[in-house]
Amino acid sequence: MEGMGGHFPMERGKTMRKPRLGVFKFTSCDGCQLSLLNLEEEFLAVVDLFDVAYFREATDKPLRGTFDLALVEGSVSTERQKEEILDIRDRARSLIAIGACATAGGLQALRNWASLSSYKARVYPSPQDIHALSTSTPLSDHVHVDDELWGCPVSSKALTEVLVAFLLDRRPALRGYSVCMECKRRAVPCVLVSKGEPCLGPVTRAGCDALCPSLDKPCYGCFGPKDDANMESLLHRFRLLGMGSEECRALLDKMNTHAYRKAHVESRT
Ligand code: SF4
Ligand code: SF4
């Protein structure tokens, strides 16, 4: 498969140019950018190997020029962001969506199934000052994304893999299987089978090393639906546990609500 990094040929007698990295934020809590900063040792290596040309969480460099790699956190939730993401796409050779907000619209996508005006009235003292779209959508609804790093927040390991893969001009090796595989690998007892707890692990992409099941809790779906997730089958299992439609819906309606609902519709067709 083709890599994302492209080539940085070194001309004889010249130093190789460092790839320009931009880190951008849309509607989000900044948690995924913090995952990047939390890399600590590895982040220092990133600073060494990349030209960190734009990263408002870490530097005050203004937005200028083009980027070899853009990491974008957050969902598109305002008219202005619709224009900004097009601008970033134009500037970036490779654009990667990082985190549930950027890949699935985030928790703020709950409004996609509700009335924005009623949310605004309940949350803000001056709702008339809030200029937001009635939906919160993933970046891929607006521009081509070269890859997606799921998770709320994204895992530091996956971020490192993406950066290394870019430098080596190869596809990042991201896990395509479900959280159940991580449980099996860690010999974690299954909370769905042993305790009858509604666990989203069978339909959720791996990446957390089965953190919640390893603490005897069901998976809450932080990493979003895996490809070809059989949502209908899992929800049928939940109904056998005595759960009603509302309870099932509440399980799905979290930070990846947009993606799980879409996967549910697809699993029924
Ligand atoms: S995906 Fe989660 S951690 Fe990342 S910015 Fe969105 S809400 Fe924050
Ligand atoms: S606990 Fe959840 S994620 Fe782990 S094996 Fe059981 S269903 Fe799968």
Image (cartoon, rainbow, N blue to C red):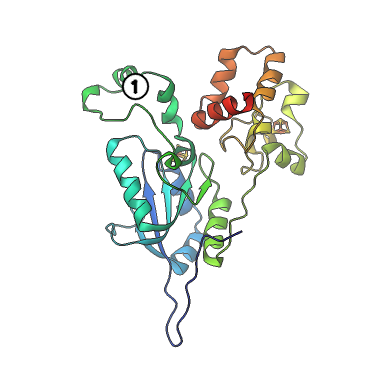
Whether residue 241 is visible here, answered yes or no, is: no
Q: Position of residue 27 (x, y in %)?
A: 37, 38
Q: Nearer the viewer, residue 217 or 144?
A: 144
Q: Position of residue 173 (x, y in %)?
A: 62, 54
Whether residue 147 is visible here, answered yes or no, is: yes
**Which residue is label 1 attached to?**
116
Q: Is residue 70 left or right of residue 239?
A: left
Q: Is residue 243 left or right of residue 102?
A: right
Q: Position of residue 199 (x, y in %)?
A: 66, 27
Task: Please give the name of the residue rendered at 53% of the width and 32% of the height, measured from the top-left corner.
Answer: 259
Figure quadrant of the N terminus: bottom right
Q: Position of residue 40 (x, y in %)?
A: 49, 57
Provide the secondary structure element on which disc 1 rests. helix
Q: Nearer the viewer, residue 233 or 20?
A: 233
Q: Amino acid at mark 1?
A: Leu
Name above or below for residue 1 compared with residue 237: below
